[in-house]
Amino acid sequence: MKLEQIYTGCIAHAAYYLESNGEAAIFDPLREVQPYINRAEKDKAKIKYVFETHFHADFVSGHLDLMKKTGAKIVFGPTAKPAYEAIVAKDNEVFKVGKASVKVIHTPGHTMESTTYLLIDEHGKEHGIITGDTLFIGDVGRPDLAQHVVAELTQEKLAGHLFESLRNKIMPLSDDLVVYPNHGAGSACGKMMSKETTDTLGHQKKVNYALNPSLSKDEFVKQLLNGLTTPPIYFPQNVLMNIKGYESLDTIMQRGKRPMAVPEFEAIANETRAVILDTRAASDFAKAFIPNSINIGIDGNFAQWVGEMIPDVKQEILLVTDPGREEECIIRLSRVGYDNTLGYMDGGFEAWKKAGKETESARRITAAEFATLYETEKPVLFDIRKKSEYDVEHLVDAINIPLNQINNHLAEFPRDKPFVLHCAGGYRSMIAASILKQRGWDNFSDVAGGFSEIIKTNVPRTDYVCPTTML
C-alpha cells in the first residue's frame, strides 16, 4: 500500500493519494484534478474512488471533475445528501482499493456527515486515519460552520456530537495509527492547529486539548467554542457548491484565460460590475495601479483573502497579474469558488501604463519613517491584524480593526486628518489600503514590513499578554 500526502500550503490543505495493486483512491482533492490523474498514471493505476470526508467549506473539492474524467466513484459518509451521483456509505462499511482496505468511521461533529477513513494495508494491519476536519494535529474542527447552511445545527449541538465521536470512535483506536488531517496551521477550519501535518494518534492523545480524557462533555463544549472567530463569508457558499455541484474547471479556465488589450479591458470594466483584482506584490501595487482596483497579492494567502474581501463567489473579476501568472490566479480563485473571471490585462499593468491611462498610488513609509512620524505628529494608528495578534502585542494607542472587518468599520477611518495602517508584514495592510483608496480615502500611509519591522524601532508597545488570548 502506498499513501502520499499532497499538501498545498497557500490554503493549508492536504489531499491524499492511496494506491495498491493497480488501483488508487483520492481523498479530499482540490479543484485542479490533473495532478492526481498524472500521479495515478505514473503508477499505472486506475483511480477507483474519490473519498470525501465531508462537504468542505474552505475550498471547492475536485471530486466531480475526477469522477467525470476517470470514472471513479464518489464516496461520502453516512447522512450526506449530495445532489449528484455518489455512494453514501454506511458506518463501518469497507471499500477495497487493490489489496488495501478503507473502513468508514462516521464521526459527526464538524458537520453531521463528517467521516474518518481507517486505512488497512494488504496484510490487514491498520495503518492510519484520514480524519478530514474531525481531528487536526493539535486541534479539532470548529463546530460552528454547518449552522450557516442548516440553521438548526447549532454549534453547541455539533460540539456535543464531536465530543461523542472523539471519545467513542477515535480515542479507542490504536495509538500507533498515523493521523492524516485535511488541514494544517493557517486554515480557518480550526483555531490552534499545529504546523505539523501528521502525527501518531497516541501522541495526539497526550498533547491535543480536545482528546484530554478528563474533560467532561460540558467542559469540552465550552473549551471548543471559546475564542471562535466569525468564519469567512465564503464558507457557506463553498459548502453549497460542494453539495449541489459546479462547473468543470476546464470551462472556468477557458472562460477566464482571455487576454484583453487595454481598450477592451477598460470597456468591460466600465460596462460590468466586475472587480479589478490586482494580484501583484504589495510593493509594486503601491507605486502605481489602475484606479478602483483591489490588491490581493498572489504570493500570500491569496484564496482566503479573496474569500474574505469579495463577499459573493459569483462576483465577476478582471485580473491584473504579473505576466505568466494568469492561469495560476484563475486556478487559485476557483479553489474557493470564484469561477467568474472574465479575462486579464494582456501584458499586465505595464500595458496600462504604456497606453497612457490614469493611475493611482498608495503611500508607503518605512518603519524608521513611521517611528519619526509617531514621535513628532502622533498620527491616528490602525492595526489591521487579527484580534489574537493584537492582543499578544501591539503599539500603544493603536486601534484594532481586523482586515476582514474593515468594510463594517469604514466610518472609523478619519477623512479630516492623517492616519497610518499596519499589519504584521505589509501584505494585509496593502489590501486595506487598496480598499480605502477605492472608497475615496487619500490621507493615510501604510508601513512597509508592518509590525515585524516596527518592533525593531523604539516605538512604544504593550507588554506580552497571556497566550490564551490567541485561541
Image (cartoon, rainbow, N blue to C red):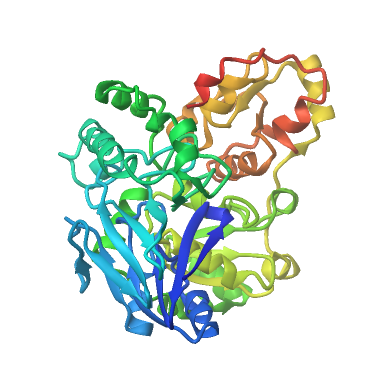
> Left or right of 422: which side holds 250?
left
Q: Residue at x 38, y 35 (%)?
A: 230
How many numbered marks appear? 0
Q: Residue at x 38, y 48 (%)?
A: 133
Q: Please state the horizontal and vertical placement of residue 32, each as a whole percent of the image.
A: 47, 72
Q: Please state the horizontal and vertical placement of residue 326, each as a whole percent of the image.
A: 60, 71
> Left or right of 368: which side holds 228?
left
Q: Please state the horizontal and vertical placement of residue 100, each as a whole percent of the image.
A: 38, 71
Residue nearer the viewer, 112 or 150: 112
Residue 446 visible in image: no
Residue nearer the viewer, 434 or 169: 169
Residue 353 visible in image: yes
Check the image and report above or below for 305 versus 271.
above
> Left or right of 20: which side holds 462?
right
Q: Please state the horizontal and vertical placement of residue 348, each as a whole percent of the image.
A: 68, 68
> Left or right of 59: which side holds 367?
right
Q: Residue furthest front?
A: 123
Check the image and report above or below for 182 versus 431.
below
Q: Residue at x 83, y 21 (%)?
A: 372
Check the image and report above or below for 451 versus 236.
above
Q: Residue at x 36, y 38 (%)?
A: 142
Check the image and report above or below for 362 versus 374.
below
Residue nearer the viewer, 136 or 270: 136
Residue nearer the viewer, 217 or 302: 217
